[in-house]
Image (tube, rainbow, N blue to C red):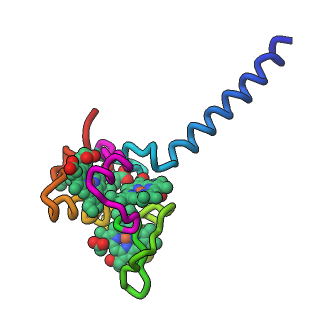
Amino acid sequence: MKKFKILPYAALFSVFLLAGTMAAFAQENIEIVHDAAFENQTRPPVAFAHDAHNEKAGIDDCGECHHAYADGEKQMGDDSVGMECSQCHYGKPGQGVADLIRAYHLQCAGCHGERKAGPVLCGECHRRR
Ligand code: HEC
Ligand code: HEC
Ligand code: HEC
Ligand code: HEC
């Protein structure tokens, strides 16, 4: 009999697990960047409190990072929200993981350098905790 009592709890628990996983994909809970294309990371995870960061930095346009291009031109007023950077910057012929790393570094550290605000040193983004 005991066995059958556990089952409903197991089912309930897996619902919580699922909800937790889905919540992790909502941008309001993002605390680190984790692009699925990186399998074995050599550096500590990159600190990035998505919404708080963008508010502090005063970035209103999602397309500033989640950009959309057509014929090599950046499309103002359009974006690629919901796609990982690696969906465009990794895995196409001639593209390696170095291209994806470069894309992140150029976008993140590039803006920090331009605005003279935000971290530019390895250990400030790849924070050990
Ligand atoms: C400063 C750059 C930046 C800005 C501005 C930005 N995002 Fe993001 N966003 C990211 C990064 C980086 C990730 C994490 C990508 C990963 O881990 O694969 C992300 C992840 C997300 C995700 C999770 C799903 C996914 O694509 O992995 C959603 C949804 C999202 N952003 C929506 C938005 C919306 C809506 C806005 C505008 C209100 C916005 N973002 C503005 C950089 C940005
Ligand atoms: C829908 C496809 C797509 C997505 C998603 C995408 N990009 Fe791009 N990105 C492009 C294209 C196309 C170009 C222009 C051609 C090129 O340089 O590869 C570009 C250019 C760039 C550049 C060089 C120009 C610049 O803006 O400084 C950087 C850096 C970059 N992307 C970083 C990122 C990052 C980081 C993400 C995720 C937050 C991202 N991209 C998401 C398609 C995409
Ligand atoms: C368009 C400009 C821009 C882009 C793109 C950008 N940042 Fe920033 N970031 C800023 C500015 C401005 C600040 C300083 C905000 C302040 O504290 O006043 C900042 C601050 C930070 C900080 C300090 C703590 C915090 O959250 O405020 C971290 C960490 C950070 N950025 C990580 C990232 C990462 C990782 C990416 C790429 C996924 C990124 N940033 C992309 C503009 C940008
Ligand atoms: C402005 C923030 C920022 C700075 C500064 C920065 N990185 Fe990164 N780096 C990133 C982001 C964002 C990614 C993508 C991480 C992910 O998706 O998990 C990344 C990815 C990487 C990766 C591939 C993933 C891994 O862990 O193996 C390496 C290697 C790396 N960075 C090394 C460096 C080195 C070395 C420096 C200093 C020269 C540096 N980074 C500085 C933001 C930064």
Q: Which residues are magenta?
A: 44-63
Say if residue 94 shows up in the picture: no
User: Which quadrant of the figure contains the C terminus?
Assistant: top left
Residue at far right of view: 1
Q: Residue at x 38, y 49 (%)?
A: 51
Q: Does 124 appear above or below 129?
A: below
Residue at far bottom of view: 71
Q: Residue at x 72, y 25 (%)?
A: 10
Residue 93 image offset from top left, x and y in percent: 43, 77
Say if residue 19 shows up in the picture: yes
In reply to whether residue 47 is colored magenta, the answer given is yes
Q: Does 20 appear above or below 99?
A: above
Closer-to-camera residue (15/7): 15
Asked whether, in this view, residue 17 is left or right of residue 99, the answer is right
Q: Quadrant of residue 29?
A: top left
Q: Does 20 appear above or below 106?
A: above
Q: Residue at x 47, y 68 (%)?
A: 80
Residue 109 image offset from top left, x and y in percent: 21, 59
Q: Quadrant of residue 5?
A: top right
